[in-house]
Amino acid sequence: MKRMMILLLAGASVAGCATNDLGDVVDNRTVRDAATGAAAGAAIGAVIPGVSVAEGAAAGAAVGAVAGAVNRNRDDGRTSSGYRGSGWAEIDGSVRNDMAIQDRVMSRYDTNRDNELDRSEGQLAARDLRRLMDNNNDGNISREEYDRNRDYALRNL
């Protein structure tokens, strides 16, 4: 009975971690985390007496899926100011980490006011930031350009 409860609990944990708030199946990372945990659990089950390989794999899958989901919930692509969205990948890294610039970008470029920077909004912000900060027009904002033009960009963004 105890083994059956462990297997049922493990299966429920994996199923619970495989869905997000909307009930949709999330990306393959949860499945990959569960598979990694299952492999580790199976290895442990083969070594530890009293634990079968199947029980170890089930428990490992549950732990892997839960740990992966918790880790992603903690770091779900948010910036240091707490904003998220796919548009932040469009913006140069040295600028993306500045909290004051993040606030200015969100106030100006988040046109639908959903507190997420969409890809198209991020592309517009990146274009304007390059226009304000990229002095040598190489397409990247170097650390020197960032340091020299930060205040100017904040005033004009």
Image: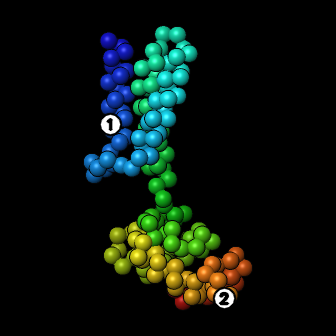
Amino acid under disc 1: Ala
Residue holding disc 1: 15
Total of numbered circles in the picture? Answer: 2
Question: Of residues 5 and 82, which is closer to you in this image?
Answer: 5
The location of residue 143, given as percent across then percent down, is: 70, 75
- Work out how far the residue at label 1 is from the one at label 2, CA to CA, in angstroms: 52 Å
The location of residue 57, given as percent across then percent down, is: 45, 25
Quarter of image, res 117: bottom left
Amino acid under disc 2: Asn
Visible residue check, residue 20: yes
The residue at the point 52 percent across, 64 percent down is 79
Quadrant that contains the N terminus:
top left
The residue at the point 29 percent across, 49 percent down is 24
The residue at the point 72 percent across, 79 percent down is 144
Return the residue found at the far left. 23
User: Mark 2 packing: few (<14 Cα in 10 Å), some, or many (20+)?
Assistant: some
User: Mark 1 packing: few (<14 Cα in 10 Å), some, or many (20+)?
Assistant: some
Q: Earlier in the sequence, mark 1 or mark 2?
A: 1
The location of residue 41, given as percent across then percent down, is: 49, 25
Visible residue check, residue 69: no
